[in-house]
Image (cartoon, helix red, strand yellow):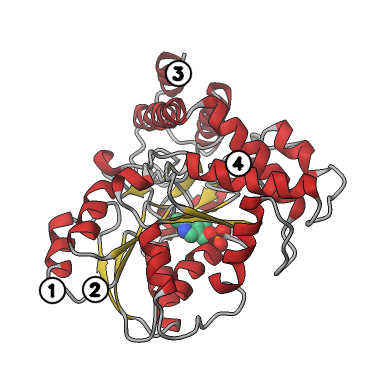
Amino acid sequence: MHKLLMIPGPIEFTPEVLSSMSEPTLSHVSGDFIKIFGDSLDMMKKVWMCPDGQAFIMAGTGTLAMDMAGANLVEKDDKVLVVSTGYFGERYAELLNRYGADYRILRAEPGKSVDPAEIEDELRTGKYKMLTFTHVDTSTAVRVDPVPIGELGRKYDVLTVLDGVCSVAGEEIRQQEWGIDIVLTASQKAVGVPPGLALLVASPKAMEKFHNRKSPVQNYYADWSNWLPIMKAYEEGRPAYFGTPAVNLVSALNISLSQILDEGMEVRFLRHKKTAGAFRTALKAMGINQIPDDSVAANTLSAPYYPGDIKGPDFIKEVNRAGVVIAGGLHPELKNRYFRVGHMGKITKEDTLATIEAIETSLSVLNHKFDRGAAQRVIEDELG
Ligand code: PMP
């Protein structure tokens, strides 16, 4: 029996996306596929809201998208500021270290964001080339506001890199208006395509910095010198080859991006916000608190603490028995104290209700006392 996949990626995909995956594979240099690829690049710029950007689609995961920004924009001894709100901020620092970056990490306590004034104090020193931040850190469900960071990037001429693996197509992002140089993600989350694609849009300023590099890119596969001509060729409707694209995934991406744009970005942002708000209130009605402060809580996932003396593995197993798959903790300091529920992409009110019901059932089975039914009423009220 299919269990409802409510982890923070991969997520549930639409039937149209899934059936497109089973179509016979096209030649990657055929006219039909060139159009699918070219249109997908075009639609990405609409979803990212970056009309003047350069889009990249590559076979790989979100980590490759992070790597692309690191490999192509950083040279040895370049100064990079890593704003870390959890596990994936630490990953970015580790990655940049491989390219010889001289990095500094600004860390927020779990559940909190980093104060833009603190970021400005660092950037004011004038030595930084780049800043990375995680829009939504999937280990803490903290959402960082990109607007002040984009402003600081412009003010101090620092490239800003937004890790949007757990945010793009779910959280509000206006890349060009907000002056963010790189917005990167992976296919398996709010973009709504099975795992396997690394997606990125770079601003003209980021491409200029890339073109002005003094040393060769220290990563063969991720090197934009190899991929930029390919993306340009697909945009212009010409065949080109560097590495074989993930044909079926790109066809699925084309379908999903069309569905996202048909829904409309504003409607989609609002739907994610409403679902997350209802989910948070419903958890509170069960007496369950979350890691992030409400003011910085993500709209794409929740990170609730286990209530009372509930044991994580028992609880997750019970929820699974009730037909819903959720995830355990990821942040090293808090790992055993919380769980994670994704609510992005095509999620409906019925999915949210089913998840709340499975959580309630599991808490009852594990003899936890709470006001059963209160959370379901919240969902009915807020999403009804
Ligand atoms: N950044 C964030 C914020 C993520 O949530 C993830 C995946 N959970 C990644 C990066 C890495 O993506 P992937 O697992 O696709 O490599």
| Sequence order check, earlier mark of 2 and 3 | 2
Q: Which amino acid lies under the numbered mark 3 shown in the image of this protein? A: Leu
Q: Secondary structure at mark 1?
A: loop
Residue corresponding to mark 2: 128
Marks 2/1 in contact by CB < 8 Å: the verdict is yes
Check disc 1 and give the amino acid type: Thr
> Does the beta carbon of the residue at mark 4 sit less than 8 Å from ligand 1?
no
Distance from Cα at disc 2 to Cα at disc 1: 8 Å
- Image point (51%, 83%), residue name: 218
Mark seen at residue 192: 4
Q: Residues within 10 Å of mark 1 (few under 14, many from 20)?
A: few
Q: Amino acid at mark 4?
A: Gly
**Closer to us: mark 4 or mark 3?**
4
Q: Position of residue 374 (x, y in %)?
A: 41, 20
| Residue at numbered disc 3 | 383
Dot 3 falls on a residue whose secondary structure is: helix
- Res 113 seen here: no
The residues bearing labels 4 and 2 have C-alpha atoms spaced at a distance of 35 Å
